[in-house]
Amino acid sequence: MPGGGRSGKDWLRSICCYCGTGCGVLAQARDGVVTKVKGDPDHPVNKGRLCAKGALLPAIFESDDRLLRPAIRASKGGALAPASWEGAIERVAEGIRSAVERYGPHSVMFYGSGQLPTEDYYLFGKLAKGFVGTNNQDTNSRLCMASTVAAYNLAFGTDSPPASYADIEQANTFLILGANIEACHPILFDRIKARKRRGDDVKVIVVDPRRTRTAEIADLYLPVRPGTDVALLQSLLFEVRLAGGLDEAFIAERTSGWGEVEASLAGWSAGRAADITGLAAQEIVDAARMIASNGPMLTLWTMGASQSTSGVDKNLALINLSLATGNIGRPGAGPFSLTGQPNAMGGREAGGLAPTLPGHRLVANPEDRAEVEAAWGLPPGSITSRPGVTGSEMVEALERGEVKVVWVVATNPVASLPNSERVRAAFAKAELVVVQDAYHPTETSELADVLLPAAQWSERAGTMTNSERRIGLLEQIGEAPGEALPDWQIISRVAAALGYAEAFSYGDVEEIFNEYRELTQGRDLDITGVSYELLRASSKGVQWPLPEGGREHPRLFADTPFATPDGRARFHVPAHRAPDDALTERYPLSLVTGRVKDQWHTMTRTGNVPKLNKSEVEPVVEIHPVDARPLGVRTGRPLRVSSRRGSFQARARVDRAVRPGTVWAPFHWGALRHVGGPVNAATNEAFDPRSKQPELKFAAVRVEPL
Ligand SMILES: Nc1nc2c(c(=O)[nH]1)N[C@H]1C(S)=C(S)[C@@H](COP(=O)(O)OP(=O)(O)OC[C@H]3O[C@@H](n4cnc5c(=O)[nH]c(N)nc54)[C@H](O)[C@@H]3O)O[C@H]1N2
Ligand SMILES: Nc1nc2c(c(=O)[nH]1)N[C@H]1C(S)=C(S)[C@@H](COP(=O)(O)OP(=O)(O)OC[C@H]3O[C@@H](n4cnc5c(=O)[nH]c(N)nc54)[C@H](O)[C@@H]3O)O[C@H]1N2
Ligand code: SF4
Ligand SMILES: [Mo]
């Protein structure tokens, strides 16, 4: 079949393209389009189950807003007109070439996504960092995983998630902080629920300012005041120590820096933390006793911890708690940040973030640069040590005119970055905006000067890595519609038009994988023992590392040293700070944003699936009765929510689920999907100084009924 797609009765193996759970799916195509999907019964993650988003994947192919052919805008303010692939590629190459000639390579920005397969991610970086010569390559994982990457590196010496999903079945205590797993990792939630049903002594602690469905299985639910997790976690460690829960032997033999952390606990009694977090002191003591006495403990967290100006401190405080109690490298234990996107991990591995190079290398490290230059056949000095612009700094760089050309692949930043009006204005200022997406229009593609149609899930092959380091192969099952091409082919064509044909000529995506794989040799994520053949032969995929001739490692740091200079895990003192946006009389409420179970991000796919649109038909603002009453607001009433940056409108849902003083809204509905405007009009672009991850979970707002 042309394009390698198949049809008929073949069930081909793939991985669901939504969340980082990484469920195995079997899919069947008819006439080149996937028409049937079912959970892979042999896949260890989901054992045949799928949530609604996964099960309804065939419906994403029924929408009529697929981007089918390239388009070019002849002049700013003009209209997009259909173009040939040759014309569009030449326009992109010419834009990059001319910007590099006039302003240097750092005037070009490459903005990718945790929804790209590892091969495509790798290739985008090879072009940016290796050949164009700028580290201005970043990814939407900046909004998502950056705080965790920074904290893992600080604590373990590498960005290596220690635990596996199999630890869920062995854990006795679950500490779930800032994670709505029921909605965002539904199949993992099923596994946690099943564990709780079977084990009499299994305890669940949920820390979240909103009583989500995840909190329904909690033995102890802690409705923390938004942004105060470090205070809570310092106090938990203080009280765990009092309760005799420290693992002194582990601290002595496997860690360093405990002295400083222990000293920093002075004064963090439950009483003091109660004042800051808005919790009862007794709740904190109860949680600490559970942690101290009911191990092993698995700590799970996501955006409620990471999307914060104290994101790295929150991550470090979570890791400290695991280290001090010896909950790492053991069955049922571990600090475990769940990844959001299907290939957030792959991007971290392949060098998708501005400071990184393939194989967990750093642009700041001369040896790392030299190794990658050699692998790419580049003369020494080709890769610069100059720090690249990150996704969160991109807007300012556009505003200042430092970045002139921006190439966006598989992400929708005008909808997903905070303070969206500012983002839109910054993109409008660019000389050239290139958007490579499977759909059009999106909030970002509307601003494109060149539109490049991409093949999406099932229409192209590649590998992705889930939260537990499990690499899976996504086979090509259907065929791309219209003239859409796999991302790696588009990147290769642009590279060729820039004069780098030799370094970017690949017969298929497997060749890219094999090239990338060599760059992992001897690294913590060594996958020299992995091949497409191996991935095809087993329905499980492979958990890294798997060196050639070696074995898989479901659990890291059990009997191997940490990757720090002294081989010990490193404690770091976390600082408690208030969020960036101050609550005042004018802006008295905390806006917290999040997700609903049946929608995916900016809705380009799930928003077109009728069965998924039934559960939540429009965005809402959840508000506690205590805050709603004085405003005379009832459920259904339209509200305006305003921050210091901007405002949006949505209907009220008066609900005791949110903490008094806090309002919650889902961020899925962008400017194109909701006349009331996007939630991100109001969110805050302030970011953590170490991870540069923005504070998407806290904005000071005022709410007015309309
Ligand atoms: N259905 C669905 N699933 C998804 C996605 C999707 O779009 N839709 N996206 C995927 C992606 S990319 C990601 S990153 C993950 C995100 O997964 P999650 O992080 O679980 O999802 P969110 O709803 O963004 O935020 C989680 C919780 O953080 C809480 N929170 C906010 N502020 C604070 C705080 O200061 N402290 C604490 N302790 N909690 C706080 C919120 O109330 C919210 O319930 O989901 C993935 N899965
Ligand atoms: N207020 C608020 N804002 C947030 C968050 C929050 O919690 N609150 N969460 C943040 C987080 S964690 C994340 S991860 C981001 C996500 O934000 P985005 O990445 O902007 O959201 P998506 O809608 O997933 O965008 C993916 C785009 O890629 C396209 N696409 C799908 N498949 C392919 C493909 O194979 N190739 C190409 N080229 N394109 C494809 C889709 O059509 C879509 O336009 O949002 C962030 N923004
Ligand atoms: S849990 Fe995540 S990976 Fe599994 S089917 Fe649902 S969206 Fe897909
Ligand atoms: Mo994410």
Image: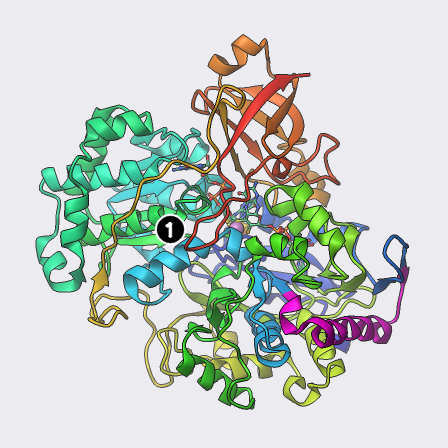
Q: Note whether 285 is above or below 133 in the view shown.
A: above
Rendering coords of residue 702 (x, y %): 56, 22
Above or below for 120 versus 374: above
- Residue at the image position 38 percent from the left and 85 percent from the top: 548
Q: Kindly identify the residue that appears in the image at 67 percent across and 31 percent down.
A: 618
Q: Secondary structure at mark 1?
A: helix
Does residue 419 appear anywhere in the picture?
Answer: yes
Quadrant containing the C terminus is top right
> Residue 515: x percent and y percent?
53, 84
Residue 669 location (% of width, % of height)? 67, 38
Return the residue nearer the eye: 57 or 147: 147
Stretch of the chain drawn in magenta: 81-109
In magenta segment, residue 93: yes
The residue indicated by pointer 1 is: 312
Q: Is residue 375 left or right of residue 198?
A: right
The percent position of residue 345, horizontal first and vertical second, equals 47, 63
| Nearer the observer, 403 or 128 | 403
